[in-house]
Structure formats: C-alpha cells, structure tokens
C-alpha cells in the first residue's frame, strides 16, 4: 500500500496512502521496521501489522472541496391524467469547500415536464443552471417542476433529477410518487361559509374535494345569481394548478384577465369585484379551500343563490346549490317574503318559521309558499303552501302539480307526506302580527332527499297580487 514505516518512538508524521489520501501515523514506542497493512477498522483507521505489534493509521481530512446533496420530493398522490402535478428539487453543498463555476440541474426523463423554475435559477426545457458560489453547508433556492401525468401512468411514478458542476461530482436523486387511477367518482363541492348572508361586501370560504387529493382538481367554479345562469352573474373560475382566479364577463362567455391569488389587485364585472387582498387558496389532503373577498354592485341587488362546481381531468361534479346571499338593495315591493328562521341548518327534523309581509296588514295575505329543493322547481321538492283563510297547509306531490296537493288544518293531529318530506300539524302554527304573518312548520326530511338545498319563498294577497320567488334560506338534509 506504499506506506513508509519509521523506526523509533511515537510519531504523527503524514504518510502517503495509495490513492492520494494523507494519513497521520500514531504509534507506540518501539516502532518496528517494516509492517503490512491488513485492513480498515470500523473507525476508518488503517490497521498495520508490524513485527511485534499492531498499529493504526488515522486519516486526515482531505483538502476542502464541495459535494452535492440533492433531494427530490412531492406532496400527496398523483392521479392518472392529472395536469399540473409538481415536485421539488432541493440542493445543498454538503462538502467542505465553496462551489466554483456553472452548476446544472436537469430532469433526465422530462417528456412530461411542462415547466421548471426556481428563484435565481436560469431554467429552460428540463434544465436549470446558475454560477453563483455556494458555501459549504448552504442551500440554493428550490427548483419546482410541473408535469402532466399520463392517463395510463403506472401505479408508481419516479421523479428524477441530476446535479453536476460547481467543482463537485455528479449526483442523481429520485422520488417515488403513488399514482391513483381515476374511478367513476366525481369531485365534490363541499361547503360555503357563510351559508346564508346579506351585504354589499362578503368574504366567502368555499371548500371542494377530490378523493385523489386536492391537487387533482383542475378548475372549481362559483356562480352567484338569481338562477343558474352565467349571464349578468358573479361567475368565477379558479384554475388550481395556475393559482389564477378568473371572472366571467357579463355575457356569460369567455374569461376576463386573471387574478393571481395570495396577492394584490382585483378583477371586476358589472355584478361583483374580487379583491386580491383577503382572497387566497390553499390545499390539505383531499380538500381545497378557496377564500374570496367579494364586493357586489348595487345594480345586482336582490336575493341570490350560490352555486358551486368542481372538475378534475376526467370528472365533473355538476352544479351544486350551496347557499344564498342578499345583495342590497333588497326587494321592497309587497307582498314580500321576509325571512326563514333558522336561516340554515343540517338536521333531519326541523321546525322552520317563514315570515311574509303585506304593505299594510297581514290579513291581506291569502297564500304563502315555501319551496325546498336544489332548484326553483316544484317537482321532487318539499313544496308547501299555507292558505290563511282556511288555516290550511298544503303539500304539493312529487310531480309538482299544485292541483293535486293534499291539505290539513293546523292544530289537528294530521300530517302530510311526499317523497321528500313530512309536515306535521302538531308543532306547526301561523301567527299574524301587524303587516307580517309567521308560518311555523314542523318538518321531517326523507334521507333520499339528502344534500344541500335552498329555500325559496313567495306570497300572494287576497286581491291576487303575487310576489316573485325569493331565495332566503338553505338546509342541508342528512343522507
């Protein structure tokens, strides 16, 4: 092994070991002439077998030099056909010297890469470079790679990266991601908070989910209007992978310039404005949370319904009716539906009070209605009417035909049932106070009617003047 062995006592003279490494020789007295190195012990010392004893050679540190440590990582699972999947490359100088020259990081199998970027990196195609020196123990800013996962991707997906240059040797790294297959299960609009609200300004928190993880969502939509119509609406689309919020123009087609969330600025149409300040998007597990700071135009006044929808690469939730919002100025013509109390809830049994108002006296009101459904449709709805002259409640059948509605008198022990709900006479009442009538009805909802519903209300006077339908409440029927 080319080790020189001096005679004499203890010695720490450097000796050259084959391969260029320098070692200190530490010996005990009576160092023998000659000697044969026989191996390396657990502490990295060279064992030298001499004539009368065994001696050890302890390595000195090599001259200072850089060395790369590279880590590739991702969050959550990928899904077949997913656009905008991401992984991160972190690069550290774990050596003892400063890097010099150009450093290159590349993604060797980059056919699915859509973008690659990092602060102070020069990136193009599937590679990034930089030449600023990196001290020992320091880390460059991370590189984020965005890729599209093929629809036929295997169950495991290997993200790879390689670094070289800067005076250090080439080092590869990889990260294994799990790829979920897309089954016929759609993404979901989970919730809106608040469910029922009123005001010219409102900060909403919307939640959406996808079983493959929130990153699998591609676009989520919010539509606020008197009905499910994108025209003259506050109609928004959020691109999950790009973190860009778009507002749809008044005509309901196309997109206005996008607004990057978690920042400043705003975007507007004639119905609403979304402020960047106070708006954000974040994901955790299977849930995406979208927070939007909205201001509504007075010309958009009235009681509106909040609809949500979500899409991933292969599935679409469809529009889901989630809540209501009153944009001032609210209707002031009579007769007028006023409110539902409680305005929202999520129980299978509920006692709900519906309040209506006449211009002068509640005695002028003849018939008032409440319709609970996902849309303003009397079919397959919990659709009730109260006829004041007879103190009667009517429940419209599943086909929505009012002429076929069954009735009962309040105060009796009767009940009415259709496929969506049962209304009990006991626990129900009607009370007139001044110009208002409050109709309280005792409901039990059928689980097959489960899901988020909106409550529309309308009223008619004895002279036949009828109000428009107004969305004034919401109820989440348990499944």
Image: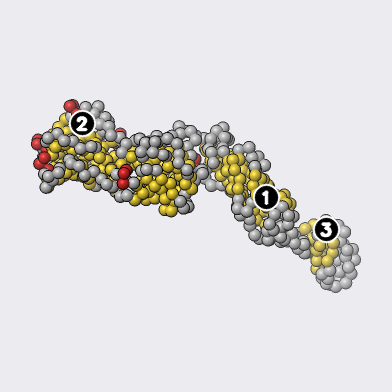
Q: Residue at 45% of width from left, 32% of height from top? A: 184
Residue 237: image location, x then y, percent: 43, 41
Examine the rendered structure and indicate whether residue 303 appears above or below residue 401: below
Residue 325 in sight from this viewpoint:
no
Q: Residue at 23% of width from left, 31% of height from top? A: 418
Residue 371: image location, x then y, percent: 24, 36
Asked if disc 2 and disc 3 are in contact, CB closer than 8 Å, the reply is: no
Label placed on residue 20: 3
Q: Residue at 22% of width from left, 39% of height from top? A: 457
Specify few, some or many for label 2: CA neighbours under 10 Å numbering under 14, 14-19, or 20 or more.
many
Residue named by callout 1 = 129
| Cα–Cα span, label 2 and label 3 | 94 Å
Specify few, some or many for label 1: CA neighbours under 10 Å numbering under 14, 14-19, or 20 or more.
some
Q: Secondary structure at mark 3?
A: loop
Residue named by callout 2 = 396
282 or 328: nearer the viewer:
328
Q: Nearer the viewer, mark 1 or mark 3?
A: 1
Residue 1: image location, x then y, percent: 86, 57
Residue 342 in sight from this viewpoint:
yes
């Amino acid at each position: 092994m080319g080790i020189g062995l001096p005679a004499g006592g203890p010695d720490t003279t450097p000796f050259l070991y084959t391969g260029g490494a320098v070692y200190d020789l530490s010996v005990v007295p009576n160092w023998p002439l000659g000697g044969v190195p026989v191996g390396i012990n657990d502490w990295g010392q060279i064992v030298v077998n001499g004539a009368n004893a065994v001696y050890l050679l302890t390595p000195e540190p090599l001259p200072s030099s850089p060395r790369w440590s590279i880590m590739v990582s991702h969050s959550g699972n990928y899904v077949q056909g997913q656009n905008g999947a991401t992984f991160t490359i972190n690069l550290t100088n774990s050596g003892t010297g400063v890097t010099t020259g150009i450093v290159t990081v590349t993604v060797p199998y980059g056919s699915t890469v859509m973008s690659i970027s990092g602060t102070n990196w020069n990136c193009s195609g599937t590679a990034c470079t930089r030449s600023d020196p990196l001290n020992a123990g320091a880390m460059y800013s991370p590189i984020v790679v965005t890729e599209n996962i093929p629809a036929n991707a295997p169950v495991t997906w290997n993200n790879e990266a390689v670094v070289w240059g800067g005076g250090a040797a080439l080092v590869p790294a990889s990260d294994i991601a799990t790829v979920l297959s897309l089954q016929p299960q759609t993404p979901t609009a989970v919730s809106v908070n608040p469910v029922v609200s009123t005001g010219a300004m409102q900060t909403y928190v919307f939640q959406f989910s996808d079983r493959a993880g929130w990153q699998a969502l591609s676009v989520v939509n919010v539509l606020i209007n008197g009905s499910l119509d994108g025209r003259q609406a506050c109609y928004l689309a959020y691109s999950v992978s790009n973190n860009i919020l778009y507002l749809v123009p008044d005509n309901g087609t196309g997109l206005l310039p996008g607004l990057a969330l978690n920042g400043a600025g705003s975007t507007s149409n004639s119905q609403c404005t979304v402020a960047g300040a106070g708006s954000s998007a974040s994901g955790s597990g299977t849930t995406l949370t979208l927070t939007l700071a909205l201001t509504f135009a007075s010309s958009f006044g009235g009681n509106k319904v909040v609809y949500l929808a979500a899409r991933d690469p292969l599935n679409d939730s469809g529009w889901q009716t989630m809540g209501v919002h009153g944009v001032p100025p609210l209707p002031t013509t009579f007769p007028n539906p006023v409110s539902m109390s409680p305005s929202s809830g999520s129980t299978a049994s509920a006692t709900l009070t519906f309040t209506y108002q006449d211009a002068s006296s509640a005695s002028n009101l003849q018939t008032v209605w409440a319709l609970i459904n996902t849309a303003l449709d009397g079919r397959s709805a919990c659709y009730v009417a109260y006829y004041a002259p007879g103190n009667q409640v009517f429940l419209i059948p599943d086909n929505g035909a009012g002429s076929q509605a069954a009735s009962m008198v309040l105060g009796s022990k009767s009940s009415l049932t259709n496929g969506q709900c049962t209304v009990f006479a006991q626990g129900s009442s009607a009370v007139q106070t001044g110009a208002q009538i409050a109709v309280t009805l005792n409901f039990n909802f059928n689980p097959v009617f489960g899901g988020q519903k909106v409550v529309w209300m309308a009223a008619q006077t004895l002279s036949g003047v009828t109000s428009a339908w107004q969305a004034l409440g919401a109820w989440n029927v348990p499944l």
